[in-house]
Image (cartoon, rainbow, N blue to C red):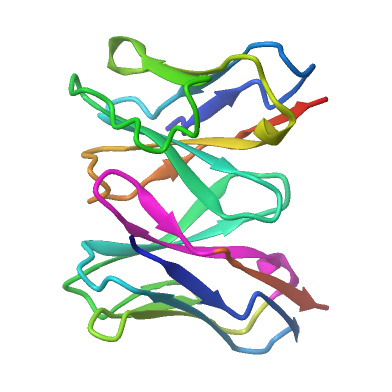
Amino acid sequence: GAGVSQSPSNKVTEKGKDVELRCDPISGHTALYWYRQSLGQGLEFLIYFQGNSAPDKSGLPSDRFSAERTGGSVSTLTIQRTQQEDSAVYLCASSLIGQSMDEQYFGPGTRLTVT
Amino acid sequence: KQEVTQIPAALSVPEGENLVLNCSFTDSAIYNLQWFRQDPGKGLTSLLLIQSSQREQTSGRLNASLDKSSGRSTLYIAASQPGDSATYLCAVPGANNLFFGTGTRLTVIP
């Protein structure tokens, strides 16, 4: 079946602009995760959605970052007033149950470059 | 906070060799441990997930072991091939997320 998909695959934006990154999880997966992978650094957690519960936003680095998940499926990560340090690969993952108890499946990522 | 370490950071081996990648974690109270592969410019591909009640898991030429009490896991790759060249990441779960190691970059030389 179809895996996790993300769009766009690459995004170049000017400093100060807003960007939206999209994630389509595997159908039927209740949990959705966003991570960021910066050059020379490991993967860091950003936000977690599970069903209709309030999201865990504890990993968001600043209030310029926000995310929503509509209808328990597609998710959008929004970065406002982008800065050069936001340049990274943004990865989305989904899992069947959530709370990191089951296997997470990752999308191909969106490479964001802020100039 | 959980800390995950992977050694070595990079490894280069000739084709056909068997090799071991190491992963250690500081908090042994984990549900499971997952090994991933990442090719350059790509996302993560899940290789193996070991539940906390298991000691090892096998998939083809890959064998992963887990020793919760010592906070360690190893990924054994048998008869390495050039197509195995990639970065290998281990991850353990937190409350709602995975904590990742920084990875081992493997190069298999033909």
The residue stretch that appears in magenta? B81-101
- Which residue is found at the position 27% from the left and 48% from the top? A100
- Which residue is found at the position 34% from the left and 18% from the top? A73
B17 or B95: which is nearer to us? Answer: B95
Answer whether residue B106 is magenta in the image: no
Left or right of A67, for residue A30: left
In which quadrant will I find the N terminus of chain A? top left
Q: Residue A66, position in %: x, y?
A: 45, 19
B109 or A92: which is nearer to us? Answer: A92
Residue occupying the far bottom of the picture: B17
B38 or A114: which is nearer to us? Answer: A114
| Any part of residue B15 in sight | yes
Q: Residue A62, position in %: x, y?
A: 49, 28
Residue occupying the far front of the picture: A63
| Image quadrant where residue A111 sits | top right
- Which residue is found at the position 83% from the left and 25% from the top? A115
Q: Residue B43, position in %: x, y?
A: 59, 44
Position of residue B25 relative to residue A100, above or below, is below
A63 or B92: which is nearer to us? Answer: A63
